[in-house]
Image (cartoon, coloured by chain):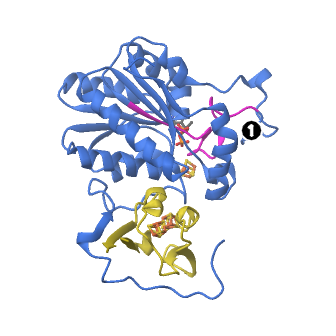
Chain colours: A blue, B yellow
Amino acid sequence: MSTIPNFIEIPVNPEIAQKEFEVYSKPSTLTDKPFHYCPGCGHSTVHKLLMEVVEEMGIQGDIVGVAPVGCSVFAYDYLDIDMQQAAHGRALAVATGIRRMLPDKLVFTYQGDGDLAAIGTAETLHAANRGENILTIFINNAVYGMTSGQMAPTTLEKMVTTTSPFGRDVSTQGYPLKISELLAMLPGVTYVTRQSVHTTANVRKTKKALRKAIELQQEGKGFCLVEVVSNCPSNWKMTPLQSQQFIQEKMIPFYPLGDIKTPEGK
Amino acid sequence: MAKSLGDVIIDIEKCKGCELCIDSCPQETLALAPRINQKGYHYAVKVQDNCTGCLNCALVCPEAIISVYRKIVK
Ligand SMILES: Cc1ncc(C[n+]2csc(CCOP(=O)(O)OP(=O)(O)O)c2C)c(N)n1
Ligand code: SF4
Ligand code: SF4
Ligand code: SF4
């Protein structure tokens, strides 16, 4: 821990810390409630980025979200927009209903890998295949976070989890699932990208990807998927900084970052 | 030459001591306090008066509790 021995706290400089010089503050589209997520969890960072985009685009009243089951089950407590919570894996089915009843609204789901790629695979695949005009934000932290770190479809080969204590053995437990690449093959799917939030540069790119996806939603271009390779420091049994390193060294080589499908034709 | 003077205000009661801001700061402006907040976390504070307002800490802070200020002086 980087506490320093000769600790001197520098007070705020009133000459600089004035509203006119402010270059960043928490988006007004987040509620005041502190996130319940563990220290350093990527869920918080993605909530923040999404709400920055919603604020900048001025769409707070036009966007409706669907929260999943998983650690982000209480997303509606933080995102100051209309939200609905769905049963485990069913976010895209609920979102489809919302989208069809309220065709003027922008609709997104926010889902973990267990929710989207295990129990909810059927809903995910068919909503994408129908080309529903919905944005799915997919947090891939390679485990079931909420239920204390069981193996997920996205768990890396040899990765130790509570249900793969000797490491994921692909001969009996299957291969880690690249669901974004799978979904990108479907004609109804417009934009698929994989990003991360483990460095400042990646945070900026994820925000851009979210903005692009919402703009495509405004244009009615069909299903969009923004995967974020994220962390679960608590269940990975790492400090937040170690988890960032694990993303860089282990997750990204298997889940490469960048656009997988774009409307411009990648 | 124009100089960028920065400052940060951290909502320490909402800080979880994750250290991501500290690691991201190119100026080593931030460190964890030896004290803890009401939630029991060591919180991030400014320990050097050399912030440039580069935004890095605010970008990576998961809790969105860092406000950044930047004043350009000629
Ligand atoms: C129908 C049903 N089955 C199982 C569960 C238990 N359960 C709650 S969260 C979860 C997994 C969540 O993992 P993930 O979607 O990866 O999200 P994370 O918590 O990692 O963000 C499971 C299996 C449940 N709530 N409902
Ligand atoms: S258990 Fe994992 S995914 Fe859930 S809040 Fe904690 S770190 Fe985040
Ligand atoms: S704005 Fe930049 S220089 Fe200032 S504390 Fe944050 S990371 Fe460091
Ligand atoms: S990144 Fe945010 S929550 Fe983490 S130590 Fe810094 S101020 Fe605290």
The one of A156 and A209 positioned closer to us in this rendering: A209
For the point 34% across and 34% down, the residue is A212
For the point 18% across and 43% down, the residue is A61
For the point 49% across and 19% down, the residue is A183
For the point 79% across and 37% down, the residue is A167
> Mark 1, residues whose alpha carbon is within 10 Å: few (<14), some, or many (≥20)?
some
- Residue designated by label 1: A159
Residue A99: x, y in percent? 25, 25
Residue A178: x, y in percent? 59, 25
Q: Is residue B57 above or below residue B1?
A: above
Residue furthest to the right? A166
Q: Which amino acid does the dot numbered 1 rest on?
A: Met
Q: Chain of mark 1?
A: A
Left or right for B45, reference A163: left
**On the rendered image, what quadrant is the N terminus of chain A found in?**
bottom right
Q: Is residue A140 above or below residue B30?
A: above
Residue A34: x, y in percent? 40, 62
Q: Determine whether the residue tagged by mark 1 lies in a helix, strand or loop.
A: loop
Range drawn in magenta: A136-157
The one of A116 and A128 positioned closer to us in this rendering: A128
The one of B6 and B8 positioned closer to us in this rendering: B6
Left or right for A166, reference A182: right
